[in-house]
Image (tube, rainbow, N blue to C red):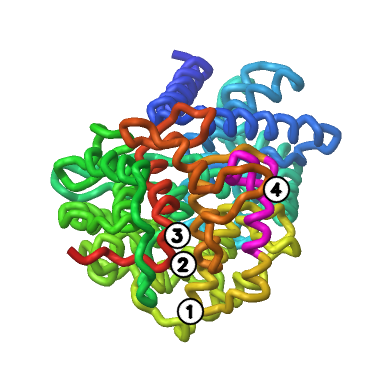
Amino acid sequence: MSWELASFALLFCALAAGFLWYERSHPSSKVLALVATLAALAALGRVAFAPLPNVKPTTDIVLLSGYALGGAPGFAVGAAGALASNFFFGQGPWTPWQMAAWGLCGVIGAALAVVAGRRLGRVPLAIACGAAGFLYGAILDFSTWVTFSGSHTLGQFVVYSGTSLPFNIAHAVGNVLFCLAFGPAFVRALLRFRERFAVRFEPVAPAGAAKAATTTAAVALVAAIAFAAAPAPRAQAADAATRRATAYIVRAQNRDGGFGAKAGQPSAALETAWSAMGLAAVGRRPSPATGRFLAATAPHVRDTGDVERTILALVAAGRSPRSAGGVNLLTTLTRRRRSDGSFERLVNRTAFAILALRAAGRSTHDGTVRRAASWLAGRQNRDGGWNFAGRGAPSGIDDTAGALQALVAAGRSRRGALARAAVFITRSQNPDGGFPLQPGAGSNAQSTAWAVQGLVAAGRDPARVRRGGSRTPLGYLRTLVASNGSVRYSRTSAQTPVWVTAQALTGLARRPLPVRAPRR
């Protein structure tokens, strides 16, 4: 077998394995759309900077995509971006090598996220992108040596590498500059998507050790329903729709105490947490088996959002987060506070950290709670709302409601800034009574439940909130409850995952924060 044939055979196996890995991860349609968009952006970035030899943002886009979304999406972005851009630059034997090299950059980004817990700052990320530029250049040097040299001697390889060194340096330096310019903002935008849509469900291992869920759209749903502070007022009496939704959640529970993505599916940590929160919000104490299931996941959580979610869920289930599965999640969480008081310098992470700490019994005078609250208050936009990434970006309902509840939990006055936040929420109500993720978009159950919880935390009665229509947010939520008790995500969506029903329960219950495990 010739050098060329052997190298391309190995290369084909690597690419086939990468795409098989991606397909086996069963990405949702939303993730597929995002991967396609990022691949197009990577290709466009390469084409746009074609006049500057080897200076392009493609490597940064690929590595940061893997860093935020995971290895399989990162690999797909890199490989597809290389293939697409070569329709402009020209296809050839170098194309599969470029696909593999950029795909590897996406996988490296995911590995950095696992090792660093997605806590790398601007400069470390820029250094990683620069190193990825040199790695990409080395792989392409090797491909040229394999494909076009005659005798494949070490001397020939050194000559090829030396000739391309100025281009590889330009590539690495460009990567560093691009990352310094847009890296953190790009990561925050992708994490926002990950929080909202990219949810991965994993069943517990047969032996009883739970696998950790890797994404945290959960935190944006869970934080609003469980943390331990002052005794909360009693929940509102349940109406027929709330009773049906509660019964649906109860029926969805598996024998191991957990809940799956849908009734009858294998138990998953995220779904179990949300279901425990929903039941606690309507005054139903989760079963001991549910608490054991959640405790089994504690040793496996890595992402900050997962840590916060697990703390909140354990408290709602009547378990201590200080000794869950042999780990102290409070210690894990507090070690992740940054010097400025924030958690990952993200609004929702910091808000949910406050809620989790209060759930575990930390007082409003606790140093970590106070510093996090100060950082969070300083990120409020002029319109009264908050954005996932920080001040200046468009305000959203979910992030505003989460920040509002966290600041109330931290002991901040409901007047002034928090009153403005409540006004921002009410002004964003749609004519159908529901609330959107961003003002002007369509209503959905999750954002509406968050809006209700934020209004309750601010001292507003959601049953009296009507803007541009005759229906309240509670009325909107009731229109989404099916005859079997499941709740649709929106009036135009047929999807009824368990988490939507659980989150809707927290809104229907009008349960003001905090919520502990109900007494039997």
Q: Mark 4 or mark 1: which comes first in sequence? A: 4
In the image, the segment drawn in magenta is 421-440
**Where does label 1 land, which residue?**
368
Query: What separation in Å lies between label 4 and label 2 (alpha carbons)?
Result: 33 Å
Image position of 367 with respect to 27: above or below: below
Image position of 361 with respect to 437: above or below: below
Q: Position of residue 490 (x, y in %)?
A: 51, 35
Marks 3 and 4: which is nearer the front? 3
**Where does label 2 land, which residue?**
353
Residue neighbourhood size for the residue with mark 1, other residues' Cα within 10 Å, grouped as few (<14), some (14–19), many (≥20): some
- Element type where label 4 sits in the image: helix
Query: What separation in Å lies between label 3 and label 2 (alpha carbons)?
Result: 12 Å
Q: Amino acid at mark 3?
A: Ala
- Element type where label 1 sits in the image: helix
At x 77% / y 41%, what residue is drawn? 55
**Where does label 3 land, which residue?**
224
Q: Is residue 112 visible?
A: no
Q: Amino acid at mark 4?
A: Asn
Residue farthest along the bottom direction in this orientation: 365
Marks 4 and 1: which is nearer the front? 1
**Where does label 4 land, which residue?**
175
Q: Amino acid at mark 2?
A: Ala
Q: Is residue 35 visible?
A: yes
Q: Mark 3 or mark 4: which comes first in sequence? A: 4
Tags 2 and 1 in contact by the CB under 8 Å rule? Answer: yes
